[in-house]
């Protein structure tokens, strides 16, 4: 606390105490600032590790009743995944399994809005279908030879009659050495 003399001037002792107190306050704030940043950094979730893109690349095929109906081709290009998905129609039974009527259509669609999140590849494929012009998909490799493809709507698995469609099993085509 500073004392003023009757003339409104600070005494030398009061002014010195004020300078020392102000300096101590600045030092205390400076010392606390790095801790506050460290605490903020600790509260932030760690950055997600980018998965090995080789786990995704290749030609993946899905079959129903012995016939291939879906072909997903993924390539690494300049550190990102690109590719195509052929056009196909799926039919589902009341449990969400593939059902008769699932078949391959003509043409391939380029993958758009390709992004990796939590070990899964999300993308949109433009279809040659006037009723469904584009479809969102989630592709998850299980291991080097197996994966699952799931149709998505609004970041949730596609549902029919309240039952979610089960993931479509896919197998990686063997490459010739």
Image (tube, rainbow, N blue to C red):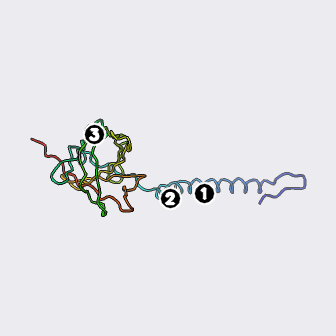
Q: Label 3 neighbourhood size at 10 Å, few (<14), some (14-19), many (20+)?
A: some
- Image quarter in which the N terminus is found: bottom right
Nearer-the-camera pick, 98 or 5: 98
Label located before the other in sequence (2 or 1): 1
Q: Residue furthest right?
A: 6
- Number of the front mark, 2 or 1: 2
Label located before the other in sequence (1 or 3): 1
Name the side, left or right, on which 153 lies relative to 16. left
Locate residue 86: give its quadrant.
Answer: top left
Residue 161 drawn at (x, y percent): 38, 61
- Note whether 49 is above or below 94 in the view shown: above
Tell me the distance, in whole angstroms, between the alpha carbons under discs 2 and 3. 44 Å
User: Which label sits on residue 39?
Assistant: 2
Tell me the distance, in whole angstroms, between the alpha carbons under discs 1 and 3. 59 Å
Residue 151 drawn at (x, y percent): 33, 52
Tell me the distance, in whole angstroms, between the alpha carbons under discs 2 and 1. 17 Å
Name the side, left or right, on which 75 lies relative to 14. left
- Number of the front mark, 2 or 3: 3
Q: Residue furthest bottom?
A: 95
Q: Secondary structure at mark 1?
A: helix
Q: Label 1 neighbourhood size at 10 Å, few (<14), some (14-19), many (20+)?
A: few
Q: Secondary structure at mark 2?
A: helix
Q: Label 2 neighbourhood size at 10 Å, few (<14), some (14-19), many (20+)?
A: few
Residue 20 drawn at (x, y percent): 68, 55
Q: Residue furthest front?
A: 101
- Number of the front mark, 1 or 3: 3
Q: Which residue is mark 1?
A: 28
User: Which label sits on residue 84?
Assistant: 3
Residue 17 drawn at (x, y percent): 72, 57
């Amino acid at each position: 606390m500073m004392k003023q003399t009757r003339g409104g001037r600070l005494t030398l002792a009061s002014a010195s105490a004020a300078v020392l107190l102000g300096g101590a306050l600045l030092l205390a704030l400076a010392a606390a600032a790095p801790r506050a940043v460290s605490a903020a950094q600790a509260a932030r979730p760690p950055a997600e590790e980018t998965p090995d893109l080789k786990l995704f690349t290749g030609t993946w095929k899905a079959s129903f009743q012995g016939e291939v109906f879906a072909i997903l081709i993924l390539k690494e290009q300049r550190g990102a995944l690109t590719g195509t998905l052929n056009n196909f129609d799926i039919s589902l039974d009341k449990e969400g399994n593939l059902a008769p009527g699932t078949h391959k259509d003509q043409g391939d669609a380029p993958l758009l809005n390709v992004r990796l999140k939590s070990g899964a590849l999300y993308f949109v494929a433009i279809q040659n279908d006037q009723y469904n012009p584009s479809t969102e998909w989630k592709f998850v490799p299980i291991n080097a030879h197996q994966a699952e493809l799931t149709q998505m709507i609004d970041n949730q698995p596609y549902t029919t009659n309240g039952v979610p469609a089960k993931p479509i099993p896919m197998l990686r085509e063997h490459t010739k050495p």
